[in-house]
Amino acid sequence: MDVPAGKGILEVSYIGYKTQEVVVGKNAQITIKMEPDTQALDEVVVIGYGAVKKRDLTGAVSSVKNEDITLTPATNPMQALQGRVAGLDITQASGQPGEGPKLQLRGTRSFTASGDPMFIIDGMPGDYSTLNPNDIESIEVLKDASSTAVYGAAGANGVVIITTKSGKAGKININLNAYVGFNGWATVPEMRSGDSYINVLREANQIAGTYSTDEALFSSPEAYKAHVNGQYIDWADELLQTGVTQNYSLSVSGGTEKTKAYFSLNFSDEQGQFTGDDYKVYSTNMRIDHEIKKWLSVGVNMQGSYVYRNKAYSRFINSLVSVPLGTVYNEDGSINVTPVPGDGNTINLLLNQDKSVYRDNNQNFKLFLNPYIEIRPFKGMTIQSRLNASLGYDKKNYFQGIGSYQYYASDGPNASGTSASVYAQIDQNRNYNYKWENIFTYNFNIKNEHEFTVTAVTSWDHNQTDKSWQKQDNIKNNSYLWHNMDGTGIVYSNYTMSKGLGLVGRVNYSYLGKYLFSASVRQDGSSRLAKGNKWSTFPAVSLGWRMSDEKFMQGTSDWMNNLKLRLGYGVTGAASIDPYSSVATVELDGYYSLGGHKTNSYKFSENVANADLTWERSHNWNIGLDASFFNNRIDLTADYYITNTDGVIWKQNLPVVNGAYNASKLYYMSKNIAKTQNHGLELTLNTRNIVNKEFTWSSALTFTLNNEKVKSLIGGTADHVKNDDYYLSIGYPVNSFYAPKIDGMWQLGEETDAAAFGCAPGDIKINVPGMIKEADGKFYKVGDDGQPLTDKNGDIIYYTKDNKYTYSDADSQVLGHNAPKWTMGFQNSFTYKNFDLTIYAYFRWGQMINYEMLGWYDSTGKGNFPTYFNYWTESNPSNDFPALNANRETKSYIGYGSLNYVDGSFFKIKNITLGYTFPERLLKNAGISKCRLYATITNPLTVAKSHLLKDYDPEMNGALKYPLSKQLVFGVNVSF
C-alpha cells in the first residue's frame, strides 16, 4: 500500500471489531491485532429500580433506541413501536387526531382491568402521549414477571420504561427538528351511485314481484327527479378533506463535569380529515443533574404539556349507507338540511361543520415534577430519594345548538326555537397524584469473581381525583356556547382517593460473568381492597448462563460471539377495581313524606361490596435465549413464556330476587371468578447484511405467536358469558365472538335440505353444531355425548320439510377472537453514501373483527352499500350475502347478525423514509454539525386477507368512524 507523504496514520476497521488508528511511519511491514467490539453486550439496559449491562440481563427485556423511535413522524411515541417489540401488540383503530394506539403485552389476561402496561419516565410516572419523541433516549419494555414483579400490581401488564435525554459535559448542543406534511387519502369503500344504485333497487323489486316502473322505485317524485337529473351525493368526498400536520422541536443541552442540563420545547399541530377536527400539543421537558460533592448529587426532571383539541362529530358510516340521492347545498349556497328529496329522516352531517352550532372541545394540562437527592456514603453504596408530583387538569366543553345535526335529527327537519336537544355541558377533572420512593443500592465484588448488587426500595403513592359536571338544556342563544349557564341545569360532583405502599428487596449475583442470578420480592398494599385482603406478596427469580464463555465452547468463537440461556419465574397481580368498590355505600334516592315532613330516601350503590374480593395473580414462566453470530452481524433473541392467571375479577350481575338498582340496571358485585392462560413465542432478529464504506444494508425482524384461553368461569357453572361486545368462553381467547356460524348461502339444488330448516336457496345457511345429514332433506342432531337426540318414546328426532328445525341461541358457537394469532414487523434500512432509505412492513394475522359495514347490507335495495358486495342470485351463487328481495329486510334472515364477522388479517407497508445528510465539510463554516432532510410516507399500502374488506384498513378493528389516513411529511434535522 502506498502511503502519501505526510499521511502517517492508517485507519483499520472490520465488522465486529473495534476501529483502530495505526501510525505507519517508515515501517515496511505492520502487524495489527484486531480487538472484538463488545459494545452491544456492554450496552446498558434500564430495568426496574436500576440498570444492568445487556450481557448480565436475565429477564425478557426489549430495548428501542432513539433513531428507531423518531423514524415514524408521530405525536405519540408508542405509535413508533408498532411491530418493533416482540410480544407488544399495538394497533391504531382511529384516524382522529390525538387518538392514541391500543397496547396489549403478551395477550389478554384480565376481563375488567386495562391491558395497558405501566409507564415509567425517568423512574417516575409521566405522560407518554404528549412526550416529544425527540426527547427520548431509549424505551425498554419489561415483559416477563421476573422483570416486572418489582413493580407489584402496577406491573401486571408489563412495564415500559422511558429514559429521556440528559445533558453531557462539554460544548452546548442545539437540535432543531421540524416537519410539515399532509393527512388524507383515506381508503373507504366505493358506494353505489347512479346506475349501480338503481340497478340493485330495480332487481330487488323484480325478485319480489313488485316492479312496475323506475319512478315507482323511489320514495317521492322529487327523489325520482333527482335520479333523472343525476343528482347523487358522494358522502366520502363531501366529508373528508386533506389535513395539514406540523411539528417543531427545539432542544438545548450541555454542561460541566458537575452540572448537566437538558431543555426542550415542542409544538405539534395535526388537522384531521373532518372539518373542525384538530389536535394541538404544547410541551416541554427539562432535566438538571448537579453534583454538589463527590458523595452527594441532586437533580430534577420536569415534564409539562398543554393540549387543545377539537373533535368533529362523525357518523361517517351512517352517511355512507344513506340514500345517495340529492344535493348537500341549496341554490343559495347554504347547507341543505335534508339533502335527500322527499326524505326527512336523512339529516345533512355538514351542518356540524359550523362552529356556531356545534363544538366538542377538550383542554388538558399536565405537570410532572420529579426532584431527587442521591447520597453515596461509601464505595458501591447509593441512596436515592425521589419524589413525584403529578398534577392534571382536564376540561371538556360540549355544545350542540339550534341548527345542529342533533337538533334536526331529534326535533325534525322543520324544527324551530330551542328544545331539550339544545344543550351545553362542562366536564372537569382534577388529578393530584404523589409518589415517594427511596432506593438503596449496594454493589460489591469479592475476589473479582463474585459480583453482588443488593437493592431495597420503599414506594408510597397517593392518588386523588375530584370531578364536577354540569349540563343545561333549552339554551335559547347559540352565541354563548357553554359560557353562560344560569345554574338551572344539572350539577354533579365526585371525589375518589386511593393509596398504595410497596416494599421491595432484590439481589443480583454474577459469578465470573457467566453464571447469573436475580431474585426479588415485593410486598404491595392497596386501599381499594377490603380489610384482610389489602396486602399481597409478589416474588420473582431468574437465572442466566453465558454458555459462550465456557471453555468447551471455545471452538465456536470464530463464528459465535455470544450465547446465553435465561430462565425466569415470577408472580404479578392486579386489583382492577375502582376505589371504594370493596366498601358498602348508599346514595340518595329521593324523598318521601313522613308525618308531613319530607325525609330523604336512600338505596345501596349499584356496586355491592364484596369483602372477600382479592388480588388477581399471574404466575409467569419465561425461557429465553440470546445469541450473536459472525462478529455480531446476526443477533437473535428468543423467548417462550406461559402465564397462568387466577382470581380474575369480573363484574357479575346479581339475581333480580335481590332487587334491582333501577328499572334498567341490576346490582352487580366484583368477584374473583375465573382463570386464564397465555403462552407464546417471541423472536427478535437483527442482521447487518452488507457493511462497506459506501453502502450498508441492515434488517430487523420481530415475530410474536400468542395463544390465550379462558380456563374456567364462575366456578365451572358457565361455559359462555357475555362481556360487553365479546363473550368469555372456556377454552377460547378472552375476547371471543359467539354467534351462529354461517356456512354461506343455500344454493340451487339444495332446496330439499334447505326446507328442513325452513329456508330456500338464497337464504343464509347456518352451521348447527351436532347436526348430521342422513339423507337428502333428512337430518338428526347428536348431543354432547355423541348420541342422537330422541323423543319421549326413545325414537330419533328427524328434521324434514314436515318437521322443520327451529334455530335457537343454543346453535351459537365461537366464531373467532379479536386477538391476533401472530404478528410480525420487518424493517430494512439502507444507506448509500449520504442517502438513507428505510422500509418498514407489519403483519397482524389470525384475528377476527366485527366490521360494521358488512352489517349494513340491505336486501331491500333501499339502503346503500358498497359496490363490491356480492349478493346471491340464481345466476350468481355467491356465499357472501343473501338474496335481494324488496319485501324482505335483512334482519328477517336467520343469523344475519353474523354477517359482520370476518377474518381481519392484514399486511401493510407501515412507512417508507428517504433521507439525505449533507456532508460535514459543507456545514462546518455555518456552525452546523449535522443537517438531514427526509420525507416519510405512512400507510402507503394495506392488503387484507379477506375479499370482504376491500377498500378498508382492518387495523381499525371493524370501525369506520374516523378512517385511518395516509400521511406524507417532509422534515429536517439540524444540530449545532
Image: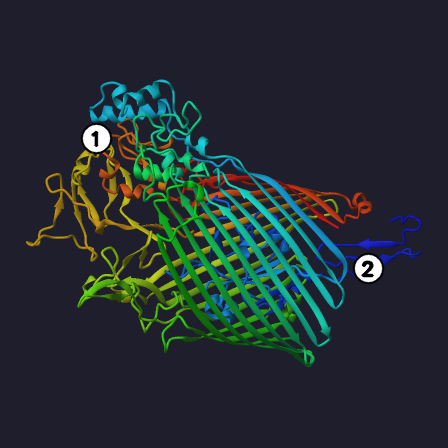
Residue sitting at x 38%, y 36%:
403
Q: Is disc 2 surrounded by few (<14), some (14 to 19) or many (20+) residues within 10 Å?
A: few
Q: Secondary structure at mark 1?
A: loop
Q: Secondary structure at mark 2?
A: loop
Question: For the view shown, which residue lies furthest in the front direction?
Answer: 596
Q: Is residue 252 above or below residue 247?
A: below
The total of numbered circles placed on residues is 2
Q: Is residue 873 above or below residue 787?
A: above
Query: Which of the labelled discs sits on residue 887, or is there none?
Result: 1
Residue sitting at x 43%, y 33%:
236
Q: Amino acid at mark 2?
A: Ile
Can residue 573 be seen in the rendering of this structure? no
Q: Please name the colour scheme applied to the rendered image.
A: rainbow
Whether the residues at callouts 1 and 2 have beta carbons within 8 Å, the answer is no
The residue that label 2 is drawn on is 32
On the image, which quarter does residue 253 sit in? bottom right
Q: Is disc 1 surrounded by few (<14), some (14 to 19) or many (20+) residues within 10 Å?
A: some
Q: Position of residue 310 (x, y in %)?
A: 48, 45
Query: Which of the labelled discs sits on residue 328, or is there none?
Result: none
Direction from residue 388 to residue 906 in the image, left or right: left
Residue sitting at x 24%, y 30%:
885
Q: Position of residue 269 (x, y in %)?
A: 57, 45
Q: Mark 1 or 2 closer to N-term? A: 2
On the image, which quarter does residue 531 sit in? bottom left
Q: Is residue 611 above or below residue 414?
A: below
Question: For the view shown, which residue lies furthest in the left direction?
Answer: 793
Q: Position of residue 195 (x, y in %)?
A: 36, 22
